[in-house]
Amino acid sequence: MKTPLFTFVFLLAVTTVFAQNDSLLQSIKIKIPTPAGKTLLMEEVEIPMVSSGDKAIQKQADIKSEFWETTVYNPYRYTPIDFPFQITFDDSTYASPVKHEKVITSRYGWRRGRPHKGIDIDLVTGDSVVSMFDGIVRFAKYSSGHGRTVVVRHYNGLETTYAHLSKIAVKANDSVSKGQFIGKGGNTGKSTGSHLHLSTTYKGAFIHPEYLFNFDDSNSIRSKNLWVTRKWTRASYHSSRRMSKLALYETKEDALASLEKQRKIYVVKKGDTLSRISRRNNTSIASICRTNKIKKSSTLRIGQKLILEL
């Protein structure tokens, strides 16, 4: 007689609790009858209902909820972004996109009269290329200029682009993990030699990769919390031939304060040329010409005042 009664009480307790907690999906508490001599004691047990798998599904849904286009290289092309904007990282390091030493052959900045919106890392055709972080492949196909290209959107909203590949090893909507093989380096598209063109974007805005990452053996992220100003999204403010001087903004207040310091007046001295002025002030000739409405061939006068955007 005790066994049927025990079973009935147990099932009643479980059914009741499930009915009360089904909408919460956090945890359930049930009372299990436990024999204690000739009586039954009701012992309460809590069972968690949320798993790490549920969280992973939620993260995937979040980054695919807006502007998820698998056939368009930049789905944010006509969408403005407010400056400064914030990027956060959970990790302190990234997976090097190439397995060998990273040799940068061309940096983010003005190059041969055009903006170079990424960095070029030397490699040999056939070298393995991996994803820098966990994420989902948004674009994996041939792109005009970039050749065979893979774009991975990561869980903080950042997208990393791996271009000029000789082979693509993933497809759109594939989930990839940090350090996972995504293709082989090559020389496809508009390229003068085998290399990896790596670019970083956030909601369509290109970001100077060296503002975010150290491209040395440490594979370190410069800060887990960064604020990005226009300076770090405009190639015309930088030279592809040298590393830009870094000023990291880890708070919104620092980023806003920096905007007041981005312009200065430079008085032309004897012997000055546009090349010399741009080199000494870490800005590009194109930026000087654009801001001051002059040409590269313009003659500078001693005492002439130039506005420099830094």
Image: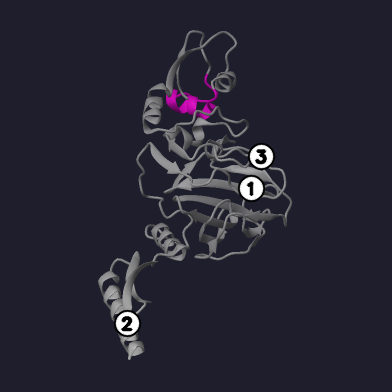
Q: Which numbered mark, 2 or 1, is in the foreground of this view?
A: 2
Q: CA distance from mark 3 to mark 2?
A: 66 Å
Instruction: Give the magenta-colored segment's residue range.
Output: 282-298
Q: Which mark is residue 96?
A: 1
How does the figure colour the protein chain or chains?
A: one colour
Residue 188 visible: no
Q: Earlier in the sequence, mark 3 or mark 1?
A: 1
Of residues 234 and 212, which is closer to you in this image? 212
Identified at 40% across, 30% down, the residue is 255
Q: Is residue 87 above or below residue 151?
A: above
| Three-letter residue code for mark 3 | Ile
Would you call the spot at circle 2 few (<14 residues within 10 Å), some (14-19), or many (20 or more)?
few
Secondary structure under tag 1 reads loop
User: Which residue does the numbered mark 2 point to in the structure image?
Assistant: 11
| Three-letter residue code for mark 2 | Leu
Residue 214 horizontal side relative to residue 261, left or right? right
| Three-letter residue code for mark 1 | Ser
